Amino acid sequence: MTRRREKPLRFEIMRLDDVDGTPVDTTVVDAASVTQIVQQAAAVGQRLWIRPADSSVS
C-alpha cells in the first residue's frame, strides 16, 4: 500500500484596519503558525480575518 503525502494545511491571515475593517495586508502561513500570530494580534488588540488558503495561494 502506497501512502499519499498530504499537503500541509495553510491559512490566509488578513490584518484588518481598526477603523473600517478593510484588509490592510495578507499572509499565508502553515497551521502551526496560526496560534502564534493570533496571540500576537490579541496582545496588541489587532483584528484578524483567518480562512483556509486556496491551493493556488502561496
Image: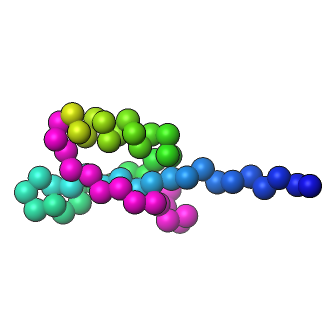
Residue 45: % across, % down: 16, 41
Looking at the image, which residue is at 39% across and 39% down?
35
- Quick check: is 45 in the magenta stretch? yes
Asked whether, in this view, residue 31 is left or right of residue 20, the answer is right
Is the N terminus in the top left, top right, bottom left or bottom right quadrant?
A: bottom right
Looking at the image, which residue is at 64% across and 54% down?
7
Residue 49: % across, % down: 30, 57
What is the residue that sits farthest to the left in this orientation? 19
Is residue 50 positioned above or below 37 on the image?
A: below
42 or 19: which is nearer to us? 42
Colour style of the rendered protein structure:
rainbow
Residue 38: % across, % down: 32, 41
Residue 10: % across, % down: 51, 53
Looking at the image, which residue is at 26% across and 52% down?
48
Asked whether, in this view, residue 30 is left or right of residue 35, the answer is right
Asked whether, in this view, residue 55 is left or right of residue 4, the answer is left
Number of labels in the image equals 0
- Range covered by the magenta-colored residues: 44-58
Looking at the image, which residue is at 60% across and 50% down?
8
